Image: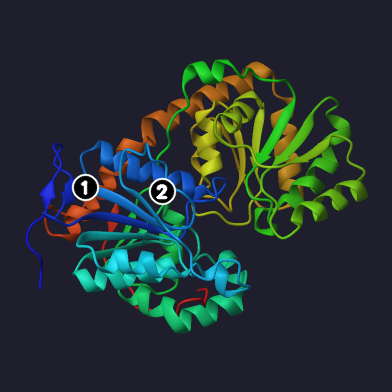
Amino acid sequence: MRARSGETTQDGQFRGREGAGIVHVIAGLDNPTAGPSYSVAGLVRAQARLGADVSICSAGGSADPACPYPDLRFPIDFAGWPLVGRLRFSAPLRRALVGTRWSIVHDHGLWLMPNIYAARAAHAQGAKFVVAPRGMLSPVALGFSAMRKALFGLAFQRRALAQVDMFHATSEAEAEEIRGLGHRQPVCVVPNGVALPDEALLASAPKSGRTVVSLGRIHPKKGLDRLLRAWGLIEDRHPGWRLLVVGPDEGGHAAELRALSRKLGLARVELRGPALGEDKVRLLASSDLFVLPSLNENFAMTVAESLSAGTPVISTRGAPWADLDTQGCGWWIEHGVDALAAALSSALDLPASARTAMGRRGRAWMEADFSEDAMARRMLAAYGWLWGERDRPDWVLPAAGATASVGRAA
C-alpha cells in the first residue's frame, strides 16, 4: 500500500512525508579520515540547505553541537570486545531508528549492524529503503574478509538487501557492479558532491615545487606497493622530486611499505600519518600532482578533493575517473607498475605552467559538475520518484535483472 503524497522543497524537490523526514544511516562518522565521513555528511548538509527534513544517525563518536541538522550519534554496545565489537551493535541506535517515523531511510555501507538497523527501520515504518553500498559490493572489496562477509550475509545482510527499494551508486561503474551481482532494484547514479575550498585557503598554500602526493587509507586495496615500485623506476630520472604517502595505517601496511621502500633503495619517499581539515586542503593544494593507484574505488573522494584544490591527478582505472583525460586535468591509466611509471614520467616532464593549467581545469570541472547542492537535488528528485511525486529522473536506472546471492562476485 502506498503512503500518502510527500512534501517538496521550495525548488520542487522531495522533502519528506508530513511528520516523517529523511534519515541517513551510517555505521560511524567517528573516523574523519574515512571518505564516507566527508561525503555522506556533505550530502546531508546540502539536503538540509535545500529545505529537506533530514537527519543523520550513526554509532560511536560525539556529534558537533553546532551542526545545522540533527546529527544523532549513539553509544556502541560491546565496545572493545574482540570481533563482536567491530560490528557496532547499538541498541539505542536500533530503538531510535525503529521508533521514529521516516519517509526515506538512506543507508550508507554494508556488513555492520547499523546497516541492518536501517533496513529494519524502513520495514517497520513503511519508509522507502535506499542503500548506498559505497564500493562494498565490488569484487575487490568482497575479496577482503570474504568469510566474515559471507557469514554476515547469511545472518543479516542478504535479507536487508532484498528489502531495498533503490540502490544509490556514486558512479556508473558501481551501478554495473550492483547489476553484476544480480540485484534487480532501480539504481540511482549520483556522485558524491564536492565542497570547493575557499580561494584564500588555496592561496595560502602555493605549489611547493616537485611534490607528488598520494592521500588516503594505507591499505593493500590502495595499490601503494605498485606506486612505490613505479617510483623506483623513475626516481633517478627526476631529481628533486619527492613522493609523499599520507594517511592512516591499517593493519600495519605502512610498515610493509617502508620495508619495500628500503628494499627498492628509494631516496625520496616519505610515509606520513593522516592530514585532516584545512591541513589536508593545504597539502593537496601545495602538491604538484596527486596519484591514486587503487585497485578499486566506487568514487574516490580524494580525486575530487585534489581537483578542487587545483592539483592534477593520475588515477588507475580502479576508480571511475575516465574524464580526467577528456577534461584535460589528469591521466586515467591501466593498472600495473609500468603504466604508472609512464604516467608519472609524463606528468613530471611537463612544465610547471602546464600542470597548473591542468589544475585550474580540474577545479572548474568540479565546480560545474560536482557541487554538493547539485548532487543533493538529484538525490531528492530520486526520493520523489520513489514516492510517485514525479517522473523517473534520467539518473535513475529502472529495475532489471534477477537477484543473486550477496557476497558473490559476478
**Earlier sequence position, callout 1 versus callout 2:** 2
User: Where residue 378 sits in the image (x, y, percent)?
Assistant: 27, 45
Circle 2 crowding by C-alpha within 10 Å: few under 14, some 14–19, many from 20: many
The image shows residue 153, relative to residue 186, as above or below, that is below
Question: Which quarter of the figure has residue 214?
Answer: top right
Q: Residue at x 27, y 69 (%)?
A: 98
User: Where residue 91 sits in the image (x, y, percent)?
Assistant: 39, 70
Question: Which quarter of the figure has residue 168?
Answer: bottom left
Given the image, on which type of amino acid does mark 2 rest? Val
Q: Is residue 242 left or right of residue 206?
A: right
Q: Is residue 45 left or right of residue 295?
A: left
Question: Which quarter of the figure has residue 400?
Answer: bottom left
| Residues at marks 1 and 2, CA–CA distance in whole angstroms | 16 Å
Mark yes or no: residue 400 visible.
no
Mark yes or no: residue 23 visible.
yes
User: Where residue 307 sits in the image (x, y, percent)?
Assistant: 53, 32
Under circle 2, the secondary element is helix
Given the image, on which type of amino acid does mark 1 rest? Asp
The residue labelled by disc 2 is: 40
Q: Residue at x 33, y 74 (%)?
A: 401
The residue labelled by disc 1 is: 53
Q: Is residue 403 left or right of residue 215?
A: left
Q: Is residue 393 left or right of residue 375?
A: left
Residue 61 image label: none
Coloring applied to the structure: rainbow
Q: Residue at x 61, y 43 (%)?
A: 315
Q: Residue at x 31, y 47 (%)?
A: 70
The image shows residue 371, relative to residue 378, as above or below, that is above
Quadrant (top left, top right, bottom left, bottom right) of the N terminus? bottom left
